Amino acid sequence: MSEISKVSFKFPTVKCAELAVKMKNDNARKQQFFQAVAEAYLVDDELFNKWWHNYLKTMKIPKSRLKAKIELINEGKELEKDFALNEEEIENIFDILENFED
């Protein structure tokens, strides 16, 4: 079994209460919700990515930088499809993307 890390962040108290009520109505736990969101992000879920890219557009990120990042992600996906890249090669692509952000 892999190691487990705890993830925490600050969130307004009112929003936290609203989230707890909504999670209870959905018969779900906050942990399930955030694990599902993280997993969707990590596996490049199309629906999640569409929402995430729209959200990023509302942030104060220069549009040229955001556009370039999205283009690099799409190019990486195309390379993965075209060349059936192995895990190490895929990891290298994401390392390049990560370095691009700096």
Image (tube, rainbow, N blue to C red):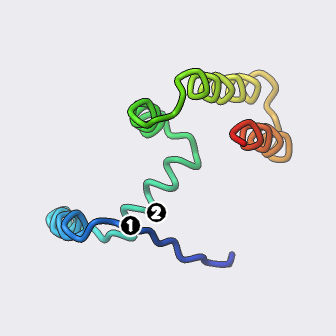
Q: Which residue is mark 1?
A: 32
State how far apart marks 1 and 2 are (Cα): 5 Å
The circle drawn on residue 15 is none
The location of residue 40, given as percent across then percent down, is 49, 48
Marks 2 and 1: in contact by CB < 8 Å? Answer: yes
Question: Mark 1: which secondary structure?
Answer: helix
Residue plotted at (41% across, 62% down): 34
Question: Which secondary structure lies at badge 2?
Answer: helix
Judging by the rendered image, the residue that carries numbered circle 2 is: 35
Q: How far across and down, in percent of the image, does residue 27 sit?
A: 21, 68
Task: Between residue 73 and residue 89, name the one nearer to us.
Answer: 73
Name the side, left or right, on which 67 lies relative to 53. right
Residue at 76% across, 25% down: 79
Q: Is residue 17 above or below residue 93?
A: below
Q: Residue 30: where, in percent of width, then height? A: 33, 69
Which residue lies at the image location 38% right of the left edge and 66% below the top edge? 32
Q: Between residue 90 and residue 68, name the one nearer to us.
A: 68
Residue 18 quadrant: bottom left
What amino acid is at disc 2? Gln
